[in-house]
Amino acid sequence: MHRRLAALSRPHVRLLLPFAALALIVLVVPFAPAAPPTTRALTIDATQFAFAPGRIEVNQGDRVVITLTASDVVHGFYLEGYGVERRVTPGVAERIAFVADRAGKFRFRCSVSCGALHPFMIGELVIGPNVPFWRAAALVVIAAVGALVYLGRTRANQSRTGVLTEEKNT
Ligand SMILES: [Cu+2]
């Protein structure tokens, strides 16, 4: 009985080794881009009826410093989710600084009525999740797949052992 238990546990260890190795790789290997939080200096220009650029991408944790300008009339800059709001007059650049601590897509819109198409003056800030988050997610997936494979094999072994025992008994 004891001998059979020992024989069973060995292949199980071998079965789990690839998953343990995979988990180790995910933890150790640096992913590209392994971008540490930096300061992102950007210039956004507001004109009737758009922001240029209309789409900005940064990484979670980055410090975002926006130089906001207006080149025709007075505009506004309101960033959803971050509560950042600023009014900008032509010829007077505004400086907006904040830390992009939440990942996701956030719209920024003009907050000063500037003409007929003012409601459509919308841009988008995309804050990509940071690398540690994806590392954690990958580890969870590996652990789940490893557990499933392990359970599947264990069940297969058990039913095979059961059949063998029955055959021996008959
Ligand atoms: Cu405007």
Image (cartoon, helix red, strand yellow):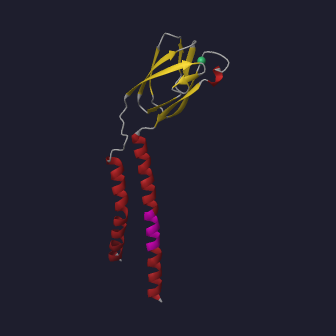
Q: Quadrant of ligand 1?
A: top right
Please name the residue shown 60% across and 21% down the image.
49
Left of 94 or right of it: where is 27?
left
Q: Work out whether 44 lies above or below 165.
A: above
Does the stretch in magenta take in 151?
yes
Give coordinates of residue 162: x percent, y percent: 46, 78
Q: In which quarter of the image is residue 15?
A: bottom left
Give coordinates of residue 2: x percent, y percent: 33, 75
How many tags in the picture? Answer: 0
Does the stretch in magenta take in 73?
no
* Along the line of sight, the residue nearer the viewer: 102 or 43: 43
* Along the line of sight, the residue nearer the viewer: 121 or 34: 121
Q: In which quarter of the image is residue 115?
A: top right
Q: What stretch is highlighted in magenta?
A: 149-157
Please tell me whether the stretch drawn in magenta is mainly helix, strand or loop: helix
Left of 129 or right of it: where is 87?
right
Q: Where is the N terminus found, in terms of image quarters?
A: bottom left
Please name the residue shown 39% across and 41% down the image.
132
Left of 101 or right of it: where is 47?
right
Q: Work out whether 115 lies above or below 125.
A: above
Q: In which quarter of the image is residue 116?
A: top right
